[in-house]
Image: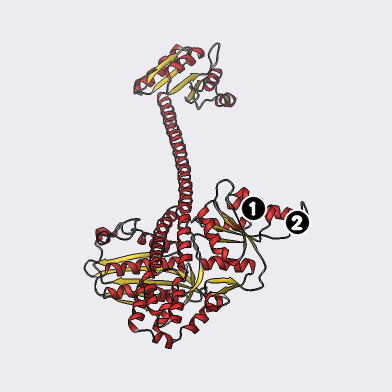
Amino acid sequence: MMTSDKQTILIIDDNAANLGVLSGYLKDGGFQIMIARNGRDGIAKAGRGNPDLILLDVLMPEMDGFETCRQLKSDHSLKEIPVIFITALQSVEDKVKGFAAGGVDYLTKPLQEQEVLARVQTHLQLQAHKKQLQQQTIELKQAKELAETARKNAEKANQAKSLFLANMSHELRTPLNAIVGFSEFIRADAELAPAYREYLDIIFRNSQHLLELINSVLDMSKIEAGRVTLNAAPFDLSDLLDEIRELFRLRARQKGLTLTIDLHKDTPHYLRTDPAKLRQILINLVGNAVKFTDTGTVTLRVSSVVHKGESLTNLFFEVADTGPGIAAEERANLFQPFAQTAAGRQMTEGSGLGLAISRKFAQLLGGYVRLSSTVGTGSVFTVEVPAEIVSDAELSRPVPACRPIALEAGQPHYRLLIVDDKPDNRKLLSVLLSPFNFELREASDGMSALALWSEWQPHLIWMDARMPGSDGFAVTAEIRAKQGRLSSGAGLSSGAEIQTKIIILSASVAEDDRQIAIAAGADDFLPKPFRSAEFFGMLERHLGLKFVYEESAPYPSDCESAAESELPVSAIAEVPPELRNGLELATERFDIAAMLHVIEAMRAEHPSVASQLERMAQNFEYERILAALRR
């Protein structure tokens, strides 16, 4: 094989004179020459020398130029070498025949040096461009293959992350469900010793805190995996701001700060966006401002720009503080997960996820979070989010439910099946349901659940979503399929007329679990950990049950009016100021143990007020407690 840097031209011609002339032209042009006297010799030399271009005479004995060219082009290793025919033939048919054989051009005798060199150089340049294009095509194909491989690997990684997220959520939240559920149940026992109540309060409070930390980490994981969705709903902006004020009023007062919320008079009150995510953004920003400000003020200013002729507005929230400010070098990474300022690291509290989550939530809402700060003066975080203006009639205002203590007389007798692979979870549901004389049975896996459903025909099934073998979704779908066959008349058996209600419970944070549950045929979906009010509310909706609630309120909807009638202003006013103030402080701090301690101190002189306040505290009705104390 030729190794010179010069380009090599193979001349195939049986005429010595032609060989001499062409060799002279090409050598003068700076090319390296190879010579062959016939077609077979030319093919052999082309295979050994791998020339850059071939000049091929048409009229040769034994094998003419056309056949030689066809054989060159049939060889995979030689077919890309450009071939220029040398001929005295002038007919169009001969030229077409040459192109059909694979030639790229013709040189017509008598040969002219300038023409020979021009055509040779032109086709060498074209060949070089062709090779470059082929190489680029190969590189592009490789790049696309690498990109596709990377995409598939990223998808696999995201799938693995999502699976890990679902599994870890289930593994972490499932035991928390038992802890929170049993703590809440035992705390409602009026005969519980005060010391044990305090211990339970500590357990409950810390489990709630742990749940919040888990949710923050899982929220960040869901954001990074692109699995957070927008859940728009109507809400009252004034109520949301009042909640923010009550959350941080005491904390600000304890630090000597002035907390101000300034709502511009022209801002619409009734709006539609995702209120939970907006609430989380404001809690994170106002909470940080109060945390890091030692003197002065924290101000939340709210305004809007309404689009003319449309029911749309842009909401603006400014959280301004007189804190230490944030240095320029710390701002760059401030919105990154787990990033904290020097002040934050010194406090050794928080996960460093609040601002990252706030920015991601704002972007999901279609807005942004921005920061301006001056060291030594303070910081201003600005949030802009779009929202739809709605009417007051579109708002849903849920009323806190009281604790059920019995079923009303004359209720039907119901069979309930509890399906969960975790004994602690089955025990929790059994404990919650057993006071009401339901007929209860339990199953620890999907196959047992199917068998029990078939033979026992329960009225309602509490079905855990994730179990080994057949999960709750698959079991639900199978039950619905069998019910469909039964209702069509195939294989009817006694009791088959019962349309079993199925409620799926899940400790997963996967937002599509609810849709999967409903698609499988479930009647409802309850995420874990759940509150007892949610649990019993579903029984009422799906079985039409009527509970007797404590404090003689027969229905959950009556609890608010009953509570208010039992806590008139005169009754609260009779409680000593130091106890009222102590309860207000404990409530603002969400310190349930301190709240119950103060309420217990009221019981000797004010038993009715203490009982009602205790019930409200155990149902986490903190706003109603504060409203009663401040009337």
Amino acid type of the residue tagged 2 in the rendering: Ser
Q: In the image, what residue occupies the spot 36% across and 75% down?
A: 301
Classify mark 2: helix, strand or loop: loop
Instruction: Decide which of 196, 233 is in the foreground and name it.
Output: 196
Colour style of the rendered protein structure: secondary structure
Where is residue 81? Give x, y as percent: 47, 24
- Looking at the rendered structure, the kind of residue marked 1 is Ala
In the drawing, what numbered circle is on residue 494? 2
Question: How far across and how far down the image is residue 403, in percent?
Answer: 52, 71
403, 252: nearer the viewer: 403
Neighbourhood count class around disc 1 (C-alpha, 10 Å): few under 14, some 14–19, many 20 upward: some
Structural distance between the alpha carbons of marks 1 and 2? 21 Å
> On the picture, is 629 further left or further right than 528?
left
Q: Which residue is identified by label 1?
A: 477
* First along the sequence among labels 1 and 2: 1
Q: Reply above or below: 33 against 336.
A: above
Expressed as whole percent of the image width and height from the top left, the position of residue 130 reads 45, 32
Quarter location, residue 300:
bottom left
